[in-house]
Image: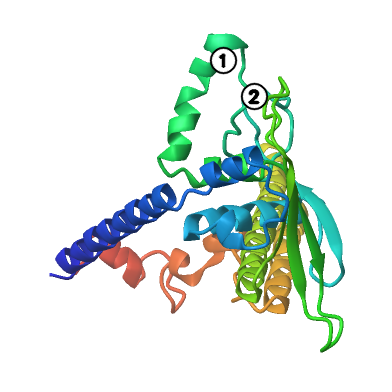
Amino acid sequence: MASILDYAKNVGSNIMGGANVLADRASNIFLNQVPNRYIDYRTGRTDPVTDIREIAPTRSTQDILTQGITSNIERKGYDFSKPFSSVVQATGGGGQYGLGRTVDYGGHKLGNPLKAGIAGFTKELGPYWNMLGGSAENQIANILGDYTVNYTPKLDPNHPEVMNIYDEYDFLGKSGEGSGSPYDINVNLSPQMIEKIKRSHMIRRKKMMKDRRATQKGIAQAAMQKKIKQAQDAGGTGGAQQTLQAQITAQANREARERVGRGEARDYGHTQTRSSSGWRSDPMWKGGRAGFQAGGIVDLYRHGGF
């Protein structure tokens, strides 16, 4: 019964998740700001864009901003204790940048076809319809592309925390197309969005540190297993085996202390080899907890004496 309920919950969750994605993509279609910003460019707009709804009016488009800024902060090693200014890098489009370029968010920027003329236009039909069809990445890429993020921490009650994104909208591709009037995009992010970026940064940072510790632990365990195998291949017994066991136990103790220091549960791991555990000297091996030798109760049971 429980498994049926769990299955029903999973199905319901997937349906709701899919419905949310479709609803958000529909919002991106109806609130798409790419055509509006291009019309402003062609008609000579001079006032800067200062409202985030003119570049990212939906949850998913704002999520792309969060993703790009968070990725950039991690890549550059910034934190929120001091001011910083950095260029958030997009994928571009049509081979605009080299394959080795580090990017902070994806999305195809139109106006940079792989080939000139009709061949290049045909190559951009797919990304063009994807942008019109609600792709959050493509919409942000075609409004901002690369953009600058500026951050100032809260210095005192009279100087609040500020995060700003800046770009000049010019829609110039490799061929210099556009022939419009460039204007500034200069938007201060809300405190709620700044907090969302900071939370995203902390989550990704914790995961990165956890992955790094797991990698380091895996390397250490592999090295120890190599030592164990070398000792076994060499037929190590007696003092050599005891030394090996002491090394394993010391390593486990160090890891346990580090975990406790980080506030995690103790996990000593496997600290013994089969031969170092003393299994052959155990009383049960010798014939029972009372120390029975041959003919004892264990042997009697073993040979069907009851």
SS at mark 2? Answer: loop
Q: Which mark is on residue 186?
A: none
Residue at 61 percent of width and 61 percent of height: 52
Q: Between residues 65 and 242, which one lies in front from this camera angle?
A: 65
Where in the figure is residue 32, as x and y percent of width and height?
48, 48
SS at mark 1? Answer: helix
In the image: residue 275, left or right of residue 23: right
Q: Quadrant of residue 126?
A: top left
Write down the residue under mark 1: 120
Q: In which quarter of the image is residue 254?
A: bottom right
Where in the figure is residue 24, as x and y percent of width and height?
39, 55
Q: Between residues 33 and 181, which one lies in front from this camera angle?
A: 181
Amino acid type shown at disc 1: Gly
Write down the residue under mark 2: 112
Name above or below for residue 105 compared with residue 208: above
Q: Residues within 10 Å of mark 1 (few under 14, many from 20)?
A: some
In terms of sequence position, does the residue under pointer 1 or pointer 2 come before the other?
2
Amino acid type shown at disc 2: Asn
Q: Between residues 65 and 265, which one lies in front from this camera angle?
A: 65
Name above or below for residue 99 compared with residue 296: above
Q: In which quarter of the image is the C terminus?
A: bottom left
Residue at 72 percent of width and 27 percent of height: 97
Q: Between residues 252 and 98, which one lies in front from this camera angle?
A: 98
Name above or below for residue 30 compared with residue 38: below
Q: Quadrant of the N terminus?
A: bottom left
Q: Distance between the residues labelled 1 and 2?
A: 8 Å
Q: Residues within 10 Å of mark 2 (few under 14, many from 20)?
A: many
Mark yes or no: residue 273 visible. no
Q: Which residue lies furthest to the left in this view?
A: 1
Where in the figure is residue 224, as x and y percent of width and height?
70, 50
Residue at 18 percent of width and 70 percent of height: 2
